């Protein structure tokens, strides 16, 4: 059941600038009018002072006494406020008075003013401050009371405090219910697994960084393979192969002619052997040139691939180490906090009551036994309360340390696995680098190879045999030999061109492979983009759910609890809006007051209590919204004195 607190009547006597003023709204709404500076705001100050000993600015040390034109207290005028409140149908009268205390010291003729004395009464029964405060607290918490009686109080809080209060108005939003409202709930749930949304965002960000490195590296590898493609002849490979076939047919024919004109079998055998060796030499030379280009190109590509994998693994290792460093630092800070709490606990435990505090510092006399007992009890209660708070804080810090240590252990295991992966890639990279260096160093001109030296030596020996066996038909044989040499030269040239086509085909195949790899990487990156979008959608959906739930609790106010930055990130805020106009910047005074009343209505339902609302500057509002609580409107008018009208 909602608790209702209504103002039945209230009187002010010598309170600030108010000499004597009383109103009896009898629980109804009331308008109080007067020109500026006649004491309208002081009425609310007096009401709060009566209850809590503070003014509307939450100052407990403000001076409620009347002041003269020079700003000095007018002696003899004692501030007093008395009010009758109806609390759930029962009237209770409260009174607070600040009484002057005068005493005549021994040996002096004039009285001297001492510290003023606060007198407190509940239904005319004098009360000690502790009992009076306890009674008021039993009616309503001080902070809650201020939120329910002042339309500007809520929006004067820090935005974090406003947001915390609003979040307390609704039940916590279940993650599964938010996921179910997204466009891809099953995919999102599967993607998250046991991770939180924040952790999954970090995972995706790291994966995207790695993929970007790999994707950015593909064009250079394609360019490298493209530059390794030799320039081929304008003649097609098929035509070249037909030419090679024709050359070999011509070669066989000329070799037969050469045999016919040869002077001896040994000379003929030598010539045939020479032609075979020269053909083999040409073929070996073409193969050597093609193989040299392909060998280093493939090794370079493999080396680049393993370097990328190693760099990515190192990046992940660094990220893991950063998390470990952060967790370690958190544990150190918490351990230090726990140590300090332990020190504070032992200091409090060993703390002894100061017996000197039982003596009045002014007159040097001991306080009465009742007051001494009260001081000792207060000391013990405060010390016990502080020790309990330290124990509670220590337990919280201990639990936090254990949780962080568990996370740290998991991260260290992950770091070890990552280090093993880095070492594996480093070993593979070193091995490939050595192979590449060896291969590059082994590539020498064909003329410096053993094959070239052996074949040219054998050809020279054939030349010597031919020369030794030559007779009178040298001219005829030389003619045929020239034809054979020319054919062999043609075979060499054609073989070289065909070898270029073979190299080009292999490099084109490598380029096709790299493009397929690039496509696959980009598809993976696009999938990560989709996952990132799903996470963003989750956050936006949760934002809408929270705002919708909260805003359904209000009549004219909508709260903006989040804002999207230019980079797409969502920040927590708390801004009251009326018709899309922000409270803090552009809302006019009338709209601000009505917004505050709307907020009070909702908070009253939440706290299940209503209290009189003091509406300052009410003249600026054409239509004040209805409230469950009693309204006390403070209106600027031309009246020289405060005037009151009940029921308006």
Image: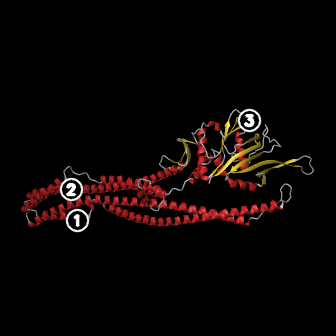
Looking at the image, residue 304 sits to the left or right of residue 147; the answer is left
Disc 1 and disc 3 in contact, CB within 8 angstroms: no
In the image shown, does 249 or 425 lie closer to the viewer? 425
State which mark lies toward you, 2 or 1: 2
List the residue tagged with mark 1: 454
List the residue tagged with mark 2: 498
In the depicted structure, whether residue 66 falls above or below residue 355: above
Residue 380 image-quadrant placement: bottom right
Count up the numbered dots: 3
Q: Mark 2 and mark 3: span between their CA atoms? A: 114 Å
* Residue 132 image point, x, y percent: 74, 54
User: Quick check: can you spot residue 309?
Assistant: yes
Classify mark 2: helix, strand or loop.
helix
Looking at the image, residue 91 sits to the left or right of residue 254; the answer is right
- If you read the primary sequence from the N terminus, does the residue marked by circle 2 or circle 1 appear first? 1
Residue under the point 83% across and 56% down: 361
Q: Which circle marks residue 641 in the picture?
A: 3
């Amino acid at each position: 059941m909602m608790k209702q607190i209504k103002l039945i009547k209230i009187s002010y006597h010598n309170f600030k600038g108010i000499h004597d003023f009383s109103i009896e709204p009898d629980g109804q709404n009331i308008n109080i009018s007067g020109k500026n500076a006649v004491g309208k705001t002081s009425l609310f100050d007096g009401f709060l002072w009566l209850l809590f000993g503070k003014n509307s600015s939450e100052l407990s040390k403000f001076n409620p006494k009347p002041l003269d034109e020079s700003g000095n207290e007018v002696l003899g005028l004692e501030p007093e406020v008395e009010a009758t409140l109806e609390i759930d149908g029962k009237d209770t009268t409260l009174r607070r008075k600040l009484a002057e205390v005068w005493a005549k010291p021994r040996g002096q003729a004039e009285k001297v003013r001492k510290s003023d004395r606060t007198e407190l009464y509940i239904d005319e029964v004098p009360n000690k401050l502790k009992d009076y405060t306890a009674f008021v607290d039993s009616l309503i918490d001080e902070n809650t009371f201020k939120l329910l009686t002042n339309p500007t109080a809520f929006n004067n809080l820090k935005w974090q405090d406003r947001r915390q209060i609003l979040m307390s108005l609704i039940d916590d939003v279940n993650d599964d219910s938010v996921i179910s409202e997204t466009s891809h709930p099953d995919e999102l749930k599967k993607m998250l697994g046991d991770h939180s949304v924040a952790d999954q965002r970090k995972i995706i960000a790291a994966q995207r960084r790695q993929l970007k490195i790999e994707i950015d590296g593909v064009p250079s590898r394609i360019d490298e393979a493209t530059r390794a493609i030799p320039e081929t002849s304008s003649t097609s490979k098929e035509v070249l192969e037909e030419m090679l076939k024709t050359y070999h047919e011509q070669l066989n024919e000329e070799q037969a002619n050469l045999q016919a004109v040869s002077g001896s079998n040994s000379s003929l055998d030598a010539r045939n052997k020479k032609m075979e060796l020269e053909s083999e030499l040409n073929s070996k030379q073409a193969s050597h040139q093609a193989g040299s280009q392909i060998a280093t190109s493939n090794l370079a590509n493999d080396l680049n691939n393993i370097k990328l994998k190693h760099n990515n693994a190192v990046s992940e290792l660094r990220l893991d180490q950063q998390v470990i460093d952060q967790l370690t630092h958190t544990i150190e800070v918490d351990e230090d906090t726990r140590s300090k709490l332990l020190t504070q606990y032992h200091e409090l435990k060993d703390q002894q009551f100061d017996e000197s505090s039982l003596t009045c510092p002014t007159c040097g006399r001991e306080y009465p036994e009742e007051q001494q007992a009260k001081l000792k009890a207060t000391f013990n209660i405060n010390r016990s309360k502080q020790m309990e708070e330290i124990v509670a804080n220590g337990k919280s810090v201990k639990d936090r340390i254990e949780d962080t240590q568990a996370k740290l252990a998991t991260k260290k295991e992950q770091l070890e696995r990552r280090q093993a992966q880095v070492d594996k890639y480093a070993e593979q990279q070193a091995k490939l680098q050595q192979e590449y260096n060896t291969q590059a160093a082994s590539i020498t001109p064909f003329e410096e190879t053993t094959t070239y030296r052996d074949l040219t030596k054998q050809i020279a020996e054939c030349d010597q045999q031919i020369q030794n066996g030559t007779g009178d038909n040298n001219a005829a044989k030389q003619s045929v030999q020239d034809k054979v040499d020319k054919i062999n030269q043609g075979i060499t040239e054609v073989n070289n061109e065909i070898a270029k086509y073979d190299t080009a085909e292999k490099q084109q195949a490598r380029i096709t492979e790299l493009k397929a790899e690039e496509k696959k990487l980009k598809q993976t990156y696009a999938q990560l983009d989709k996952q990132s979008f799903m996470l963003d959608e989750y956050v936006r959906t949760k934002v809408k759910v929270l705002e919708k739930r909260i805003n359904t609790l209000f009549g004219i106010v909508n709260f903006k609890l989040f804002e999207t930055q230019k980079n797409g990130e969502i920040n927590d805020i708390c801004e009251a809006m009326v018709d899309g106009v922000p409270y803090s910047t552009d809302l006019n005074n009338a709209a601000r007051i009505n917004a505050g009343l709307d907020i009070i209505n909702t908070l009253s339902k939440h706290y299940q209590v209503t209290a009189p609302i003091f509406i300052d500057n009410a003249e600026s509002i054409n239509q004040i919204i209805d409230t469950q609580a009693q309204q006390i409107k403070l209106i600027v008018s031309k009246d020289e004195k405060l005037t009151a009208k009940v029921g308006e």
